[in-house]
Image (cartoon, helix red, strand yellow):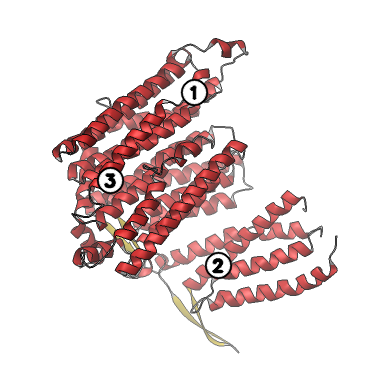
Amino acid sequence: MNAILLQLAARVIRVVMIIASVFVLFRGHNQPGGGFIGGLLAGGGIVVYVIAFYNHPLLSKTLRALAPMRVIGLILALGSGILGVLFGESFLHALWWKIELPLIGAIDISTPLIFDVGVYFAVIGVMVMVILLLMEDRKWS
Amino acid sequence: MIVFAPIIIPLLFIILSLSLNKASNAAQRIVFMAGNIITIGVGVTILATVLSEGMIVAQAGAWEAPYGITLVADTFSGIMLTLTSLTVGVVSLYSLAWKEDNLNTSVFYALIFGLQMGMNGAFVAGDLFNLYVWFEVMLISSFVLISYGSGKVQLKGTLKYVTMNLVSSFFFVAGIAVLYGEVGTLNMADLAYRVREMGSELNIFAPSALILMGFAVKSAIFPFYFWLPDSYHTPPLPVSALFSGTLTKVGVYSMIRFFSLIHVEGDVFYNQLFLFVASATMISGVLMATSQFEVRRLLSFHIVSQIGYMILGLGLFTKLALTGAVFYIIGHCVVKTNLFLLSGIGYKYTGTFDLKKSGGLIKKSPFVAILFFISAMALVGIPPLSGFFGKFMLIKAGIESKEFIHVASALAVSFLTLFSMIKIWNEAYAKDLPQSVLENGFKWGRPSNQLIVSSVILVVVTLGLTVGSKFIIDVCSTAADQLLDIDGYVKTVLKK
C-alpha cells in the first residue's frame, strides 16, 4: 500500500530530522546534545522514511550500504582516544586545533568532537541494522 | 598507560570481528584467537608490572582524581585480569570446536570481546560510576549471549536473567546516586578518604545497603541467587561455561573492592552481615544441588554454594581470610569452567545432559574420566589440589577469629560438595548405560580433540596451582595486603 500523504511528509521529515540531528551533534559540545541524541534523531528520520517507502525495491539495498557506519563510528571513537596517546599525552586526552576558514571564521576542532561524531555514526549504524532486521522479519526486503 | 590496554584491546577486536563479517571463516577464527591471546598477554603483563612496581594508576584524559575517570590496577585486579582472560581464551578455543547452536559467527566473536571488555573495565575501574558502566557493558553482551539458541527454554532462562540483572542494576545505580548525595564523590579512593575523615557525620547505611543489593544479585548470594541455576543451564554449553567461571566473580570482586574500602570497624556491614550471608549462601546452594539430576543445573547450584566461601573471606576480613578468598576465586574459576567443559564433552559422547540417562564414560574414555576426577576433587578441596589451599586458609582464619559456626558450615558444605561430585561420577562415569537408553538404539558420539585439549589446558592450570602453590599464595597475600592497606590505596590514587 502506498500512503501518498505519508510519503510526501516523510520526505520533508527525513530532511528536517537529519539537519536537526547534525545541529544537535555540534551543539552537544557545550550545551545539552551530542552524538548519541543526534544519532537517535537521525535514526528516527530514517525510520519514518522506511515506514513510508517500505515497498520500494531499492530501499533495503540503500540501508545495507549504510550498515558499515557502525564500524566506522567505533573506529572514529577509539581513534580519537588513541590520538591523545600519539601526541604524547594520556589516552582520551583532549586535543584542540583552531582552523581558519573563509566566510565562517575560526572554528575549534577537537578530539572530543571526533569522539562524538564516532558515537553519532555508531548509533545510526545500529539503528539501520535494527531496521533491516525488522524488515526481514516483516518480509519487506 | 598499560592499564588502558585491557579495555582498548577487546574494543579493537570488536571492531575487527564486526568488519570481518564477510571474510572467510578461517580468517575470523584466527583473529578471534589472536585477540584472546593478546588479552591474556596484557593481563599477565599488568600482573607482572604490579608485582614488581606496585599499584598502577592512570587518569583518562589527564583529569586528576577525584574529578576525572581513574583507572587503578593493584595485585587483585591483576590476578582477576589474568584469570578471566585465560578462562575466556580456553572457552573460546572450546567454542570453535563446539559445532552446534550456530556459535561460529562474527557477531558471537564480537560479543565475547564485549563481555571481556566489560569485565576488564570493571577490574580496573577506580570510580564507582565507572564500575556501574562496565557492569552494563558486560551485562548487555551477556544478555545476547545467554539467548543464543533462541528456543523456548533459552527464552525462559533469558527472561529471568535479564529481569533480575536489570532490577539489580536499578538498585546499584540508585545506591550510587544516594551515596553521591551524601558524600559528594564517587571516586573510590576519595570515598574511602572522606568516610574515614568524617565517618560519624555521614550516613552511608542506606546507599551501602542499596549497592549491596545490586552486587548481591549479580554475584548470586543468599537470598538473591535463585535466578542463576534457572538461567545458566539454558544457553549453549560454551556460554554457560564462560558465565559460570567469570561473571559471578566480577560481582564478588566488586563487593570485596567496594566494601573493603568503604567500611570502617563497628559498621553493620563490617563483619556479621557478610558472615551470615556467606554461611546461608554456602548451605542453601549445596542443599539445592543435591536434588538435581541435570548436570548443568547441579553445577550451577554449586556455583552459588562456592560464592559463599569467597564472601566468607570478606566477612572475616583478616589478611589470611582475604588471601584464602583470592586463592579460592582463582581455583574455583578454573575448576568450575572445566567441569562445565567436561559436561559438554560428556554430552558429545552420550547426547544428553541428564545424569539418569547417561553412563559408561569411564569405559568409553578413561582419559576424560581422569580429567573429571582431578577437577571434581579440586572443587571439593581434597589435598593437594587447588580447592584445598583456599578452604584451608579460610577455615584457619575462621578459627583464629573464633567464628566457629561459620567454620562448621564451611566444613559441612565441603562434605556435601563431595557427595554431589561422587553423584556425577557414579551416574555419568562409573555406572553402565541404563537399559532403557540402550533399547532405544543408542549410538556413541565422538567429541573432537580440540574440546578435550581445552579441558586439558585447564586441568594443567589446576595442577599448576598445586605445584606453584607457594608462589601463588605469595601473590594472593600481596593482594590481601593491598586490600587491607586502605591508606596506601588512597595515597597512591589521590597523591595526598
Mark 1 or mark 3: whose residue is earlier in sequence: 3
As rendered, which of B16 and A49 lies closer to the eye? Answer: A49
- Labels 3, 2: one chain: no
Residue of label 3: B274
Q: Which mark is residue B346?
A: 1
> In this orientation, does residue A20 appear?
yes
Residue B424 image point, x, y percent = 42, 21
Q: Tell me, yes or no, whether dots 1 and 2 are on the same chain.
A: no
Q: Relative to B419, say whether B266 is above or below.
A: below
Name the amino acid, label 3: Phe
* Disc 1 secondary structure class: helix
Choose top left, top right, bottom left or bottom right for residue A8.
Answer: bottom right
Q: Which residue is mark 2?
A: A36
Q: Tell me the subunit letter for badge 1.
A: B
Determine the chain carrying the residue at label 3.
B
Vertical arrangement, residue B396 with respect to residue B383, above or below: below
Residue type at tag 1 = Gly
Q: CA distance from mark 1 to mark 3?
A: 37 Å
- The local crowd at label 2, few if under 14, some if 14 to 19, many if 20 or more residues have their Cα within 10 Å, is many
Q: Measured from the top left, where is residue B419 in percent x and y?
A: 35, 22
Comparing B130 with B274, the one in front is B274
